[in-house]
Image (spheres, rainbow, N blue to C red):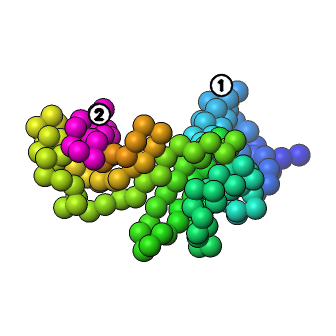
Amino acid sequence: MPTKINSIPIVKLEGIIILAQINTIQMKQLNLFFIFSVLSVSAFAQMNVSKKDVPSAVVKSYLSQNSKGATDSIWTKETMTIYKVHFVDDGEHYEADYFADGRWIKTYREIDQLSIPISVTNRAKEMYADHKIVKAYIELNNDGKFYALDLLKGNDKLTVYFTMGGKFVK
């Protein structure tokens, strides 16, 4: 027989007290809310992983591109199919993204905004006058080497790309 608080029956499950007077609809809503909350947090969380838990194709691809194979690299699992490695090369911090099958996506490093060529900065300000440059990167991907700028307007963030020569790409 359940315990009662102020004559309302309660049920205790693994340390959680549930009031038995909650109706079925409210309970379903609470369950859905809880499930959605757990899934949304886990879906967007980066998860650190041990190198031994990274698919061998990913590690092999990383080592073939980075012959130094930084021993202090940190691996994260970004999504179910994307792995990221954080590493240092010649004193610079880099991040590289790979699909789980080992295909390389991109390698990039954050740069100081003062390192962006003035022509790129001016073009970004001209095209997105109401945005502020919040971060800048040099990115290498299958399409080439680019300046990537994170722009912010209120809560809206977008990333724009320029060639190393300063031409707007996307």
Q: Residues within 10 Å of mark 1 (few under 14, many from 20)?
A: few
Precedes in sequence: disc 1 or disc 2: 1
Vertical side of 94 occupied by 83: above or below: above
Q: Secondary structure at mark 1?
A: helix
Instruction: Residue 5: give x, y in percent of width and height.
Output: 70, 50
What residue would you read off at disc 2? 169
Q: Which disc, if any, is residue 86?
A: none
Residue range highlighted in magenta: 155-170
Quickly name the residue at label 1. Answer: 25
Residue visible at 22% across and 49% down in the picture: 133
Q: Where residue 167 sits: x, y (%)? A: 22, 38
Of residues 86 and 40, the one nearer the viewer is 86
Q: Is residue 76 visible?
A: no
Is residue 13 at all visible to an observer of this figure? yes
In the displayed structure image, the side of residue 25 where residue 156 appears, left or right: left
Q: Nearer the viewer, residue 18 or 152?
A: 152
In the depicted view, which residue is nearer to us: 115 or 20?
A: 115
Q: Where's the C terminus, which quadrant? A: top left
Query: Which amino acid type is marked by label 1?
Result: Ile
Q: Which residue occupies the foreground of this view, 113 or 11?
A: 113
Question: What residue lies at 48% left-to-right and 69% top-to-bottom?
Answer: 89
Kindly indicate whether the residue at mark 2 contacts the one at mark 1 (C-beta within 8 angstroms).
no
What is the quadrant of residue 113 in the picture? Answer: bottom left
Q: Position of residue 34 (x, y in %)?
A: 63, 40
User: Is 132 above or below relative to 127?
Assistant: below
Residue located 71% across and 45% down the image: 18
x 58%, y 69%: residue:
68
Q: Tell me the kind of residue under disc 2.
A: Val
For mark 2, does the 10 Å Cα neighbourhood hold few (<14), some (14 to 19), or many (20 or more) residues? Answer: few
The residue most toward the top is: 25
